Amino acid sequence: MLEVTKLIVNYQMDFFSVLKIVIHSIPSFLIFVFPMSVMMGVLMALLRLSSDNEILAIKSGGIHIFRLLPPVLYFSIFGCLVTLFMTLYGAPASRLATKQLLIQVVQSNLNVGLKERTFNDQFKGVMLYVNKIDPKTGLLKHIFVQDQQDEQRVLTIIANRGKIISDNQSSRFQLQLNDGTINQVDQEQASVYSVHFDQYFFTLNLDQLLNNVTKETKKSFKEMSLTELTNSLKVKDSDYMLRLIAFHKNLPCHLPVLCYLYWPCHWGLQRKHKDDHLAWYWA
């Protein structure tokens, strides 16, 4: 997937797009933040009761210390359910929404989808290689294009400079090439033609690139909810074991919320005020 940092710094994404990406990333963080927040909240509450001698007062009033555990348990179960929902549904939906947002950015700025010093074959019948991309001006340097859309006539274009011109009304882009050479191989006549040009326009069709990344049937396992993973396990193909692993990886992610109860209860209820710093250390 495209690097969000590169999009923000180099390609100057608008504020609302950046804000959407930040919002979509929140569920993935909550999977780890919420269990720790539950643990720290319980620990701080019990340490405060212990430091104010409230625990001693409760014991002196004839109330058993375990009477404090049900509220803690209910709060932890609530945290467990929230983490479970975020793991199974929230995070996959946010990853898919982020992916679709980045696709829209690619549609508006094709330079984002190109990679330097890499043969880009996402275009139908066209191989594109760019040695250097200036993120500020969008200028392409040392460009190599191989056009195989017509199998009988293969075009090889080499240019020193170029720039991509977008068409907002369609998914087609014009590649403006400067100072280059066109080599055409005609297999029917067994001949080769070479032409030098100062400026040449080449059309890039983005339909195949967008179709490859927008098909919902091509969701990655991290973008599938629990229901989708369960339904996908009904089909036993070459990716069956990978889907099964992804299914089992999602299930236990919420259990640490309950496991984290031991430390805050142990240190918050049994340690004295002088050992409070040890409670924070072990937490």
Image: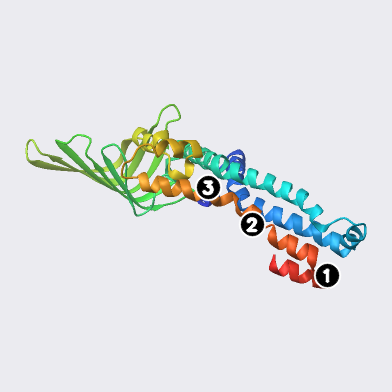
Residue 144 position, x and y percent, is: 28, 48
**Quadrant housing the C terminus:** bottom right
Determine which of the numbered discs, if any, sits on residue 259 in the image. Answer: 2
Residue found at x 76% / y 49%: 70
Distance from label 3 to label 1 (Cα)?
A: 37 Å
Mark 2: few/some/many CA within 10 Å (<14, 14-19, 20+): few
Q: Specify the quadrant of the image occupied by residue 78.
A: top right
Q: Give the residue at the far bottom of this rendering.
A: 274
Q: Secondary structure at mark 1?
A: loop
Q: Amino acid at mark 1?
A: Lys
Estimate the spatial distance between the alpha carbons at disc 2 and disc 1, rounded to whole Å.
23 Å
Q: Secondary structure at mark 3?
A: helix
Crowd rating for badge 1 (residues with CA inside 10 Å; few <14, some 14–19, many 20+) = few
Name the residue at 33% across, 44% down. 178
- Image coordinates of residue 157 in percent, x first then y, are 25, 45
Q: Could you tell which of marks 2 and 3 lies nearer the N-terminus?
A: 3
> Between disc 3 and disc 1, whose residue precedes?
3
Amino acid type at mark 2: Cys
